[in-house]
């Protein structure tokens, strides 16, 4: 029987998937909050309130604008510290410089990280919310994924999508590096691992090992 519940919300113009992972005790970790408008923030806040959850963590897989739009809201509302990979800090701080170019003139700058995530480390929020961190560059230099081994779940941001993979034409992106991350990290996980993607539907490692577009490269 699963000891965690995973809820996703699709926010902002980029249709980014925000992930809330909660345990039976009501503790919750928010990964990649993409809520930008007041309406989107209220959707997330209402879910937290209705489920009687206590937010205990805030994590980013990477710091492209669509994945950090709600960082300020989450920190201001729940008082939790942000965890990112150190190679994402420069990108996080640059978001405020270009947000207006994507129509996010009202972007509230993300708080600075309270701690950094390292490859092969484990971030725990109690006994059930245990995230194994893997550094998976290629879409961005400091991209990480979060593996909940006991649950057979991977929160993988923009590395792998159902049938596709993250773009590599943004600063810090590199196709060869991304392919290496997918083959040497993600595809080494059990086939039945459920993958929560930063955009689009969930998938499994086994499905993507058979059909993903990355196999053509």
Image: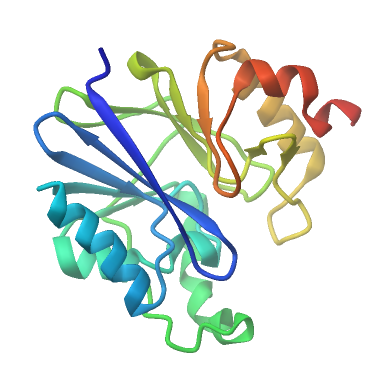
Picture quarter containing residue 189? Answer: top right
Q: Is residue 105 above or below residue 144?
A: below
In the image: residue 131, left or right of residue 135: left
What's the residue at 53%, 64% (across, down)?
66
* Residue 100: x %, y % from top left: 56, 87
* Residue 74: x %, y % from top left: 26, 63
* Residue 76: x %, y % from top left: 19, 70
Q: 107 or 91, which is in the foreground?
A: 107
Colour mapping: rainbow
What's the residue at 43%, 87% (across, down)?
106
Which image quadrant: the N terminus? Answer: top left
The reply to whether residue 111 is visible in this rendering is no
Across the whole image, how many numbered discs are drawn on residues?
A: 0
In the image: residue 82, left or right of residue 173: left
In the image: residue 126, left or right of residue 44: left
Residue placed furthest toward the right = 216
Q: Is residue 176 above or below residue 8?
A: above
Q: 123 or 53, which is in the foreground?
A: 53
* Residue 4: x %, y % from top left: 25, 27
What's the residue at 59%, 12% (across, down)?
191
Picture quarter containing residue 125? Answer: top left
């Amino acid at each position: 029987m699963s000891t965690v519940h995973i809820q996703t919300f699709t926010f902002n113009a980029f249709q980014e998937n925000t992930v809330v992972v909660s345990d039976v005790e009501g503790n919750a970790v928010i990964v990649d909050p993409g809520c930008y408008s007041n309406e989107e923030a209220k959707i997330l806040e209402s879910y937290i309130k209705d489920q009687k959850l206590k937010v205990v963590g805030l994590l980013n897989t990477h710091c492209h604008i669509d994945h950090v739009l709600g960082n300020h809201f989450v920190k201001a509302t729940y008082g939790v510290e942000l965890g990112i990979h150190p190679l994402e800090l420069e990108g996080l701080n640059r978001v405020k410089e270009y947000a207006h170019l994507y129509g996010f003139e009202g972007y509230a700058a993300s708080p600075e990280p309270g701690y950094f995530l390292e490859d092969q480390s484990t971030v725990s929020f109690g006994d059930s919310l245990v995230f194994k961190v893997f550094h998976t560059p290629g879409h961005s230099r400091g991209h990480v994924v979060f593996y909940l081994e006991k649950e057979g779940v991977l929160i993988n941001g923009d590395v792998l999508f159902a049938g596709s993979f993250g773009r590599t034409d943004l600063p810090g992106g590199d196709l060869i590096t991304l392919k290496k991350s997918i083959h040497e990290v993600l595809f080494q996980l059990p086939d039945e691992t459920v993958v929560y993607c930063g955009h689009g539907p969930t998938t499994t490692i086994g499905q993507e090992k058979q059909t993903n577009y990355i196999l053509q490269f």
